[in-house]
Amino acid sequence: MAFRAVKGMNDILPDEVERWQFAEAAFRDAVRCHGYAEVRTPIVEPTALFVRSIGENTDVVDKEMYTFERHDDSLTLRPEGTAGAVRAYIERTTHAREPVSRWYYLGPMFRAERPQRGRYRQFYQAGCEVYGDKGPTADAEMITMLYDFFLSVGITGLDVKVNSLGGAVTRQRYHEALTEYFRPRLDQLSAHAQTRVEDNPLRILDSKDPKDQKAAEAAPSILDMLDETDRDHFSELCKSLDDLGTPYRVDSRLVRGLDYYTRTLFEIASTAGELGSQNALAGGGRYDNLVQALGGPSVPAIGFALGLERLILAIPAKPATSSSLCFFAPLGAAAARRSLVLARDLRRRGLVTEVDGRGGSLKSLLRRADALGARCAVVIGDSELAREAAIVKDLANHTQGLVNLSILAQFVEKLLKSAANQSSGEVN
Ligand code: AMP
């Protein structure tokens, strides 16, 4: 029987991994220059951590967690990154060492959702958290960092939505107002939404079901219920975004799935690339009460997570760059041994080099060099060895020459570097 990967969980093979590495490196660069440092927390946490933070009546906790028992403990594969980060922040008494912490993370998350394009059961998120800064400037800076990051990797068609949920009291009042609004409209709602009216009516605003969307059209707006300090926070955020020139729109229906949010909420979507219907690239918001709710001090915080699979679907394919690979085609055992030594000299210069030691005909070796997209091939047979030389084939320009082995490394380095310069010139 042949094994298959678990449904909704994907292999990332070498031909795709370059895009991943590009996206990850771009993310790390973007956040590093805003003062973020990486945190790595376990993939498994106590189940109760997620129930307490994300909220009992959310889809994630309700039906999407991978939970298992081990040594009488209930453990869960993390469905998101914030809960574990907050747990670590509290456990290490980070707040006592620094007033503001800026953390980022990157890694796999697990949710048993219905798999489709852009929605998986194991997926990767990169995210940021700022602890200890309650001001709206932190919110505006974070949203703008994210927006600028997406632009920097070439994503177009960006749509930035912001909203405010107010503090815990406002949120509770809004919950009650929504329940009152939906109760007499039960028959206009989808079956799933009907079950949410009492325990989590905010989620109905999020529903993709056209029936729910229609029923919610005249629902009260959270923005009308904000108290004065919430309102000030939100208008300061909007002013800062205006100053920064970050385009956004206020969407009072934006609520998002997790229970811990307070005040600022945001989401960035894109119409670019191959995203399709799952076009939300990133989402986040403030969670000023979460650190305390999980047993820590009263420390305000804000964070976001972006989905790396969706990011990669949205990044435009780069024009093919000319390769800087040097391929060795030794003909015979003595030439293969010598090739290893020569290849090591090239690698010590930082050049990407592959030695094909399988033997076989020159024709088949060169076919492989072509398939790899090599820039040059170094051919060494017995007669070349006897002359302490190799044939270097420039595979891009279809020229070749005999090069003395004593200067082979310098020769190939020059050739490959000229190829790299040409290609970066083409891309920029
Ligand atoms: P969330 O943690 O639900 O706020 O999601 C933040 C971002 O993570 C989304 O905007 C998506 O880009 C990504 N994301 C969430 N769930 C999935 C999933 N099941 N598969 C792939 N990406 C996801």
Image (cartoon, helix red, strand yellow):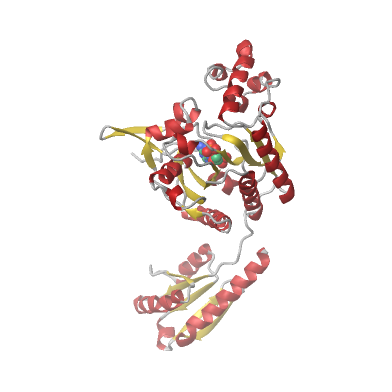
- In percent of width and height, residue 220 lies at 68, 22
Q: Residue at x 50, y 66 (%)?
A: 367
User: Going 46% across and 67% down the picture, which residue do you hit?
Assistant: 364
Q: Is residue 412 left or right of residue 248?
A: left
Q: Position of residue 296 (x, y in %)?
A: 43, 39
Q: Nearer the viewer, residue 394 or 264?
A: 264
Q: Quadrant of ligand 1?
A: top right
Along the line of sight, the residue nearer the viewer: 269 or 223: 223
Location of the C terminus (image quadrant): bottom right
Q: Which of these two is toward me, 276 or 183? A: 183
Quarter the N terminus occupies: top left
* Left/right of residue 76 with respect to residue 410 in the rendered view: left
- Can see residue 215? yes
Tell me which residue sits at (55%, 31%) in the image.
257
> Horizontally, is 187 left or right of 325 in the view?
right
Residue drawn at (70%, 39%) of the image: 235
Which quadrant of the view contains residue 360?
bottom left
Name above or below for residue 208 compared with residue 153: above
